[in-house]
């Protein structure tokens, strides 16, 4: 009763706020912030220029600062940015947009898709927040722009750079419950023509929290065992302004992750498995502006070795993009490009993927249209032709209407096709998944301080690939399901002087042919964030409600995870000294000490605490 | 008339003696209704690491299945990969393999009494062997270091570990000598070809007999012969296809009452699930689940049947010893509910009902 009341209250709050708001993303749109800064580098403009006609969310700066000592998974979980599926703190965490699965989200780092060609997923717990300057979440299908797998949504992690800022040094230390430590260091020089910056981090946690084990009689309190993790990484970025028209960029990212894989608590013995992810990502880019448009060329290499208790799986991806944007006239812009990706697994299994895409953006008066299409060739295999149309109509000073329809697809992963061991067999005869995704929504703003958006959506995936254990107890994937997801997403923000309040609500029905709700897909999710900022002080409160989740196909109530609320509080103080700023943060998580599970058998910790400090030193360039 | 009465005296004496003998056999409380009349229990294994194992009950009078009886009573899930349920001394012992535990519940109202976990690693099947004493077969954490754990049922403490072969699986009492139990060493994650015999009075190994590779189930027939079904051993090529040459086929062995092997019959194909054995309660008819079908053979036969009794693939088969109906357990996937199918002696399907995830066997309550 209380849960449904909370859901309704947050839902109504979200709707009210959204009806009184203005496009939240417009305020946070990085292209918008461009105008405020002297010189800014944003390498892949396509990603922002064509991201309209969709439900969008951006992570604000304050939130990023509060979450600087953690990873993207924790940030999205604590601040309620959409649904994520997780095995707990430090465990594999993947996004689930609009009732779709982990492999139905494109995860982009500066425009390149970093999902693994092996499993089609990207583990968000491997993305440190301090390596990212900007996070944007776009709901709905957009395979025309982002390619295979962009069916449920897209998350973009971008780096930004400003020229002429001088010397910048930053040091972060954070300590938390369950022996959780984070150390981050960054140093950079930003001159008038070139930028070079290096960021490193190391984090470790024992994660040995107390939980209640109901799988024994009598029920007892236990300490989570074999649940530690250790991650360290380095990000190096270089930008060189060749001349007014040309910009070169070069980035390296190397990371080593060592995670103990715990058993579900239903298994009354300690885990022994260890997962080690080592990856190396590098990218080089060239931007060229000419009178009527610009050219963008980028090449990236991803090498990822996944070692699961001695069983090693390695892949290499080479991702190359060449793209031209032409401003035909004041109303018409035309972007077309080619993406060539080479993927290899264990050096033996490989494939060539070539995608051609084109998008036309037309803007006249109150109406904005983007018509785009993509065609991909995988070796000699043809993806479904994917067109999309997005429309945004500024009906009134306070109201914008938007909508889109798109054809999307997902190429089976290497695991889907070729996995082979005694217990599981890939299926080389799989077809690509295909989807139609539709959405209609509105953005409103009655006053400057009120912004909001609401969208209704529908997404049908045909030939969904499912891994199932057969009678012989062998796992194998098949194109068995037709899944229809539909629902509502809404959020709204009210800002007045020192006060800020955000509400969110989503309703998701996601059903295969059986008509049952998909596992780990709550129908209701809602959240509220309240923040007071005053003279460098900031007090934030979030509460996120996750509705009831089924854990097996028949929606058996006995194995469902009950709905729960997780509430957190942050208190921070920013001290501005001459050339130095000091940010002190403290946080209390799960303040009502709820005993909940991320998934069946994987408990989340009860109330826990963190405290940290970030010291930033800036020496401006001598004029 | 008088002579007739006198003649009756020895008969009455014999009947009285029989009554005493029966009384002596029955250690448990007098059942209110004859054993097995209420129905049978279905063990639903659940998905590996899915934590959704469950117990269903087929209520014969109401002719329906009641699912999740453990969770419904105790308000908590059963655990990961339930392998079996056994009734003994008015308690039920649910062996939950991947949870490394036995859940002990009241045999009548299913209320939790205890969780036995200390000393167990990968337990499979439970057998009550003497008053206050039970055995459970255990694959060991590595699936190779097999043993039979001796459990003090008063305290729930594992008092001894008897080393067996690899992957000890089903365990049955001797028919002529109830002081011995027979354990089929199914190989676990390794390979074996022995049945281990244990003396329940000393908890010591009393001998072994050799069978085909990976014996998994065993039954005594009406003449006191021991039948053992073996799955065969699978060898994989480098690409994980089955190496047919070096793999061994399922077999069915017959041993006489002095445990001499009478014959060993070999099935035609190497298969993933091997062959498992059931019998009717009297023990004159054997049922074999092999290669996507169920076969029936008389316990007097000397060759394997070639025509399926039921041409359907089952994850496991079981025998309703009260009605003598064969029960087929179907696990279409390990993430959605399975089904049981009930067949009469002629193989005619009587009904089918939805149960929990991955049903792997049935048990009749018999104290």
Image (cartoon, coloured by chain):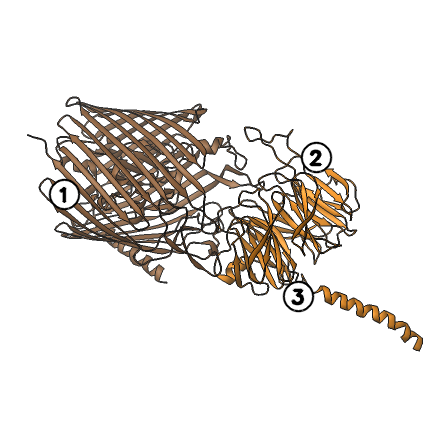
Chain colours: A brown, B orange
Residue B28 numbered mark, or none: 3
The spot of residue A320 in percent (x, y) is: 32, 24
Distance from label 1 to label 3 (Cα)? 79 Å
Which chain is disc 3 placed on?
B
The spot of residue A225 in percent (x, y) is: 41, 49
Which chain is disc 1 placed on?
A
Residue to which mark 1 is pinned: A581
Distance from label 2 to label 3 (Cα)? 45 Å
Q: Is residue A80 above or below residue A151?
A: below
The spot of residue B300 in percent (x, y) is: 80, 46
In screen coordinates, is A387 left or right of B188? left
Residue A292 numbered mark, or none: none
Residue B347, visible in the rendered structure: no
**Residue placed furthest toward the bottom:** B2
Residue A546, visible in the rendered structure: yes
Assign a secondary structure to mark 1. Answer: strand
- The quarter of the image holding the C terminus of chain A is top left
Q: Residues within 10 Å of mark 3 (few under 14, many from 20)?
A: few
- Of residues A425 and B189, the one drawn nearer to the viewer in this rendering: B189
The spot of residue A406 in percent (x, y) is: 35, 36
Distance from label 2 to label 1 (Cα)? 79 Å
Determine the image quadrant of residue A97: top left
Residue to which mark 2 is pinned: B268
């Amino acid at each position: 009763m209380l849960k449904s009341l909370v859901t309704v209250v947050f839902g109504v709050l979200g709707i009210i706020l959204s009806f009184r708001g203005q496009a939240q993303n417009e305020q946070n749109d990085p292209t918008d912030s461009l105008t405020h800064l002297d010189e800014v580098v944003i390498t892949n403009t396509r990603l922002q220029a064509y991201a309209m006609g969709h439900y969008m969310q951006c992570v604000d700066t304050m939130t990023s600062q509060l979450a600087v000592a953690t990873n993207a998974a924790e940030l999205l979980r604590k601040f309620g940015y959409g649904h994520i599926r997780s095995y707990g703190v430090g465990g594999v965490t993947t996004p689930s947009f609009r009732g779709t699965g982990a492999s139905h989200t494109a995860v982009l780092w500066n425009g390149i898709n970093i999902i693994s060609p092996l499993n089609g997923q990207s583990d968000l717990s491997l993305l440190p927040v301090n390596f990212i300057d900007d996070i944007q979440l776009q709901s709905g299908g957009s395979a025309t722009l982002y390619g295979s797998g962009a069916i449920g949504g897209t998350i973009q992690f971008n780096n930004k750079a400003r020229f002429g800022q001088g010397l910048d040094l930053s040091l972060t230390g954070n300590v938390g419950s369950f022996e959780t430590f984070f150390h981050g260091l960054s140093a950079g020089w930003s001159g008038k023509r070139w930028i070079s910056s290096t960021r490193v981090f190391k984090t470790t946690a024992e994660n040995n929290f107390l939980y209640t084990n109901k799988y024994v009689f009598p029920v007892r309190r236990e300490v989570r065992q074999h649940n530690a993790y250790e991650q360290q990484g380095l990000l190096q970025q270089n930008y060189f302004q060749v001349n007014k028209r040309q910009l070169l960029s070069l980035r390296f990212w190397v990371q080593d992750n060592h995670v103990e894989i715990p058993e579900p608590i239903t298994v009354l013995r300690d885990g022994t498995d260890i997962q080690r992810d080592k990856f190396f990502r590098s990218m080089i880019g060239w931007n060229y502006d000419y009178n009527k448009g610009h050219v963008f060329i980028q090449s990236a290499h991803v090498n990822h070795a996944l070692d699961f208790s001695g069983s090693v799986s390695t892949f290499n991806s080479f991702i190359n993009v060449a793209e031209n944007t032409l401003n035909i006239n004041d109303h018409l812009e035309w972007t077309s490009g080619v993406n060539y990706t080479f993927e290899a697994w264990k050096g033996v299994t490989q494939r060539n993927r070539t995608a051609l895409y084109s998008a036309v953006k037309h803007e006249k008066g109150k109406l904005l249209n983007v018509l785009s299409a993509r065609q991909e060739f995988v070796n000699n295999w043809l993806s479904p032709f994917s067109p999309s149309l997005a429309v945004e109509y500024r009906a009134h000073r306070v109201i914008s209407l938007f909508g889109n329809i798109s054809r999307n697809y997902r190429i089976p992963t290497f695991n889907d096709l070729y996995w082979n061991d005694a217990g599981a067999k890939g299926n080389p005869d799989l077809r690509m998944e295909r989807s139609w995704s539709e959405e209609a929504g509105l953005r409103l703003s009655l006053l400057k301080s009120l912004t909001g958006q609401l969208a209704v959506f529908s997404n049908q995936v045909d030939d969904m690939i499912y891994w199932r254990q057969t009678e012989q107890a062998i796992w194998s994937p098949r194109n068995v399901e037709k899944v229809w997801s539909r629902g509502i997403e809404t959020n709204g923000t009210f800002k007045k002087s020192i006060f800020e309040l955000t509400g969110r609500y989503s309703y998701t029905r996601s059903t295969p042919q059986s008509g049952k709700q998909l596992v780990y897909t709550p129908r209701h999710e809602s959240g509220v964030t309240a923040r007071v900022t005053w003279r460098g002080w900031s007090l934030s409160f979030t509460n996120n409600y996750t509705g009831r989740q089924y854990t097996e196909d028949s929606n058996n109530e006995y194995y469902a995870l009950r709905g729960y609320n997780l509430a957190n509080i942050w208190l921070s103080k920013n001290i501005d000294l001459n050339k130095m700023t000091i940010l002190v943060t403290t946080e209390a998580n799960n303040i009502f000490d709820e005993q909940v599970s991320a998934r069946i058998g994987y408990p989340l910790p009860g109330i826990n605490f963190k405290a940290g400090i970030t010291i930033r030193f800036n020496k401006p360039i001598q004029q | 008339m008088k002579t007739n009465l006198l003649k009756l005296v020895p008969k009455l004496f014999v009947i009285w003696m029989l009554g005493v003998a029966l009384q002596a056999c029955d250690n448990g409380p007098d059942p209110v209704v004859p054993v097995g009349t209420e129905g049978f229990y279905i063990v639903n294994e659940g998905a590996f690491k899915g934590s959704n194992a469950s117990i269903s009950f087929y209520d014969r009078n109401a002719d329906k299945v009641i699912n999740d009886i453990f969770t419904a009573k105790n308000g908590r899930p059963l655990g990961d990969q339930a392998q079996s349920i056994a009734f003994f001394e008015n308690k039920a012992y649910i062996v939950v393999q991947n949870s490394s535990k036995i859940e002990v519940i009241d045999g009548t109202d299913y209320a939790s009494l205890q969780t036995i976990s200390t000393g167990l690693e990968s337990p499979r099947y439970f057998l009550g062997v003497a008053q206050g004493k039970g055995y459970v077969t255990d694959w060991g954490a590595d699936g190779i270091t097999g043993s039979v754990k001796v459990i003090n049922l008063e305290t729930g403490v594992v008092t001894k570990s008897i080393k067996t072969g690899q992957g000890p699986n089903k365990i049955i009492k001797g028919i002529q000598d109830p002081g011995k139990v027979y354990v089929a060493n199914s190989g676990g994650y390794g390979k074996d070809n022995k049945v281990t015999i244990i003396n329940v009075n000393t908890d010591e190994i009393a001998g072994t007999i050799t069978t085909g590779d990976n014996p998994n189930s065993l039954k005594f027939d009406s003449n006191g012969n021991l039948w053992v079904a073996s799955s065969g051993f699978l060898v994989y090529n480098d690409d994980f296809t089955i190496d047919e040459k070096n793999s061994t086929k399922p077999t069915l062995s017959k041993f006489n009452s002095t445990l001499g092997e009478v014959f060993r019959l070999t099935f035609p194909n190497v298969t993933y699930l091997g062959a498992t054995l059931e019998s009717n309660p009297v023990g004159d008819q054997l049922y074999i689940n092999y290669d996507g079908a169920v076969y029936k053979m008389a316990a007097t036969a000397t060759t394997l049947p070639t025509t399926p009794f039921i041409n359907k693939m089952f994850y496991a088969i079981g025998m309703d010893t009260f009605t003598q109906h064969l029960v087929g357990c179907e696990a279409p996937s390990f993430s959605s509910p399975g089904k049981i199918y009930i067949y009469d002696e002629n193989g005619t399907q009587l009904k089918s009902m939805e149960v929990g995830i991955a049903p792997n066997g049935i048990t009749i309550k018999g104290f």
